[in-house]
Image (cartoon, rainbow, N blue to C red):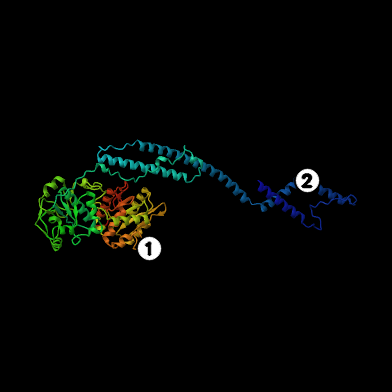
């Protein structure tokens, strides 16, 4: 109103200014009214004409009829009707928008109230969920843990919805009040990716107490390093069952285990000598090394799953073998579940040195062997674990690049397409589908970075990196960088001349992954299985650990050759 009054005053001043400056016409106009001078002489004819004009001039109806169109024309040209109309409409719409905004605000506050009620009931349900007794079977325990994990997921989702609704409001003291506080303190510390309770007190173990002068000569031939480590672990179980000292294979016929494992760590964990290196064994036997009996665990596709080339390498080391004998019909492609009693019955011997061939595929007391820390009683977390140098290097890398909370991903690709497609279902996922699975787990775990252990080509990892996004931001995929003298995280390996060794680097990858908050593994990969073994033993296993796209099938599978 003040602005409108001001505009009217301005218009009035403008009109007055115009009237003041209009020049006087030298000739009277038709409608001009002259003031009569009292002494001026007028003729009767002039007086009559003047009276007629005067009567016409003072006729209000005619004046109004003439002035109104002029006024309308003037206002039309000097006023902005569109602006006035627009202001009116804008005011109308502003009123409607305010009403709609208030209704939306009320609805959101109502939704927050309902979410608060749901949150309270979920927390009550969480608190009433009793921990299963130690006498409960593993199935009940796993179901309970799955239930609690799902419950935490729902509590977390509830909180995210509340935060999303609150993000559009400035609620001030409403949020600070205890009555409406949606950040319940009971939620602190709850996460869907909690560590798995390994129940170490319930472990079933066997004592490893070797008899004097009795040895089990380990032979591992299948696959790469991870397969050989699993083979070595199973040999340890057989040695414990048969009460023998285990002889670690020579680097001339197998991997150089001393570069990645601390062999003496195993003896310290048991408080006695239960393993010896090949060099120590050769010294004990005074270079007269003979395997007195070879009882093959596997008979197919060949006895002991040992080829002629491996036998030649052993003989070149000065190791002689007796005849290979099979104790039962056992195929590496279809291994039979065996018990400890069967093993004791078939492989017990009084001979000094015994060999049973490759046992990577052996299926003996699987639940027992797969326990956290393994099946053997000891005072450490795990028996077969990375050397101290590799462990420290992994910790330094994590401190430098990753921090405490990170996801580790073993993304196996090289040679995996054909291997996976031979399985039903296939385990080789297109990168866009893999990215979706990874993103879902990263969101659930709420961890900012991913450590990537992979043999994939840069074209594949580059595409994967571009697709793994959360809340509009890229989730970094971090790999170990090339050696850089300015970085000191790998200085220990460099000083010991272990850097650049493929097996050392593979074990370093395993160690970093085993220390992660959440691990995503490659289904069918023994590299992944060895990481999971370490995670069980070290207590780092998470409820969110899973195989890549677990429970799904690839959305596209190529045909057979």
Left or right of 459? Residue 17 is: right
Task: Describe residue 25's horizontal placement relative to residue 529 as left or right.
Answer: right
In the rendered image, residue 228, in percent from the top left (x then y), is placed at 21, 56
Query: Residue 474: where, in percent of width, then height?
Result: 40, 55
Q: Is residue 228 visible?
A: yes
Please identify, in this view, whether the residue under mark 1 or under mark 2 is nearer the observer.
1
Label 1 environment density (alpha carbons within 10 Å; few <14, some 14–19, many ≥20): few
Of labels 1 and 2, earlier in sequence is 2
Asked whether the residues under the numbered discs 1 and 2 touch, taking CB atoms below 8 Å apart as contact, a structural biologist would say no
Residue situated furthest left in the rendering? 323
The span from disc 1 to disc 2 (Cα, nearest Å) is: 105 Å
Residue nearer the viewer, 370 or 12: 370
Callout 2 secondary element: loop
Q: Residue at x 11, y 51 (%)?
A: 329
- x, y percent for residue 79: 66, 51
Compared across the picture, whether 13 is left or right of 391 comes to: right
Name the secondary structure under disc 1. loop
Which quadrant of the figure has residue 247?
Answer: bottom left
Decide which of 124, 493 is in the foreground and name it: 493
Question: What is the quadrant of residue 293 in the picture?
Answer: bottom left
| 269 left or right of 17 in image | left
Q: Within 10 Å of the Cα at label 2, are there few (<14), some (14-19), or many (20+) other Cα atoms?
A: few
Q: Which mark is residue 68?
A: none
**Residue shown at 32% from the left, 47% from the top:** 544
Tell me where residue 94 sits by quadrant.
top right
Numbered badge on residue 59:
2
Numbered circle sitting on residue 486: 1
The quadrant the C terminus occupies is bottom left
């Amino acid at each position: 109103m003040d602005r409108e009054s001001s505009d009217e005053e301005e218009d009035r001043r403008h009109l007055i200014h115009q009237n003041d400056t209009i020049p006087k016409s030298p000739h009277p106009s038709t409608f001009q009214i002259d003031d009569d001078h009292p002494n001026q002489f007028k003729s009767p004819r002039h007086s009559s004409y003047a009276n007629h004009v005067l009567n016409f001039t003072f006729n209000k109806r005619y004046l109004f009829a003439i002035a109104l169109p002029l006024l309308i024309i003037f206002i039309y040209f000097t006023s902005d009707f569109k602006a006035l109309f627009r202001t009116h409409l804008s005011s109308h719409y502003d009123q409607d928008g305010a009403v709609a905004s208030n209704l939306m605000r009320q609805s959101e506050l109502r939704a927050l109230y309902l979410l608060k009620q749901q949150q309270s009931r979920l927390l009550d349900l969480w608190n009433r969920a009793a921990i299963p007794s130690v006498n409960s079977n593993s199935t009940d325990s796993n179901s309970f843990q799955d239930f609690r994990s799902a419950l935490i997921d729902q509590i977390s989702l509830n909180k995210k919805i509340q935060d999303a609704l609150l993000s559009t409001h400035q609620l001030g003291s409403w949020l600070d009040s205890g009555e409406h506080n949606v950040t319940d303190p009971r939620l602190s510390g709850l996460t869907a990716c909690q560590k798995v309770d390994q129940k170490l007190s319930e472990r079933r173990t066997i004592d490893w107490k070797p008899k004097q002068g009795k040895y089990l000569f380990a032979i591992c031939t299948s696959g790469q390093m991870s397969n050989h480590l699993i083979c070595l672990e199973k040999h340890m179980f057989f040695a414990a069952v048969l009460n023998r000292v285990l002889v670690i294979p020579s680097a001339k016929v197998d991997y150089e285990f001393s570069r990645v494992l601390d062999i003496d760590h195993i003896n310290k964990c048991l408080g006695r000598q239960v393993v010896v290196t090949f060099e120590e064994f050769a010294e004990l036997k005074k270079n007269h090394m003979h395997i007195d009996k070879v009882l093959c665990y596997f008979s197919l596709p060949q006895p002991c799953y040992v080829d002629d080339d491996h036998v030649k390498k052993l003989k070149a080391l000065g190791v002689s073998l007796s005849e290979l004998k099979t104790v039962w019909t056992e195929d590496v492609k279809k291994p039979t579940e065996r018990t400890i009693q069967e093993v004791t019955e078939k492989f017990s011997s009084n001979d000094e040195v015994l060999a049973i061939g490759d046992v990577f595929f052996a299926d003996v007391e699987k639940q027992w062997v797969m326990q956290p820390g393994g099946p053997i009683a000891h005072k450490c977390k795990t028996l077969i674990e990375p050397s101290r140098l590799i462990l420290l290097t992994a910790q330094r890398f994590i401190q430098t690049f990753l921090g405490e909370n990170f996801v580790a991903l073993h993304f196996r690709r090289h040679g995996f397409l054909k291997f996976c497609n031979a399985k039903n279902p296939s385990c080789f996922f297109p990168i866009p589908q893999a990215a979706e699975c990874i993103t879902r787990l990263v969101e659930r775990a709420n961890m900012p970075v991913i450590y990537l252990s992979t043999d994939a080509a840069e074209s594949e990892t580059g595409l994967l990196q571009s697709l793994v996004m959360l809340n509009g931001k890229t989730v970094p995929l971090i790999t170990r960088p090339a050696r850089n003298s300015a970085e000191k995280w790998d200085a220990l390996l460099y000083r010991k001349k272990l850097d650049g060794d493929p097996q050392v680097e593979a074990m370093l990858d395993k160690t970093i992954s085993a220390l992660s908050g959440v691990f995503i593994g490659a289904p069918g990969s023994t590299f992944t299985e060895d990481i999971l073994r370490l995670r069980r033993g070290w207590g780092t296993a998470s409820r969110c650990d899973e195989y890549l796209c677990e429970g799904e099938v690839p959305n596209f599978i190529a045909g057979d050759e």
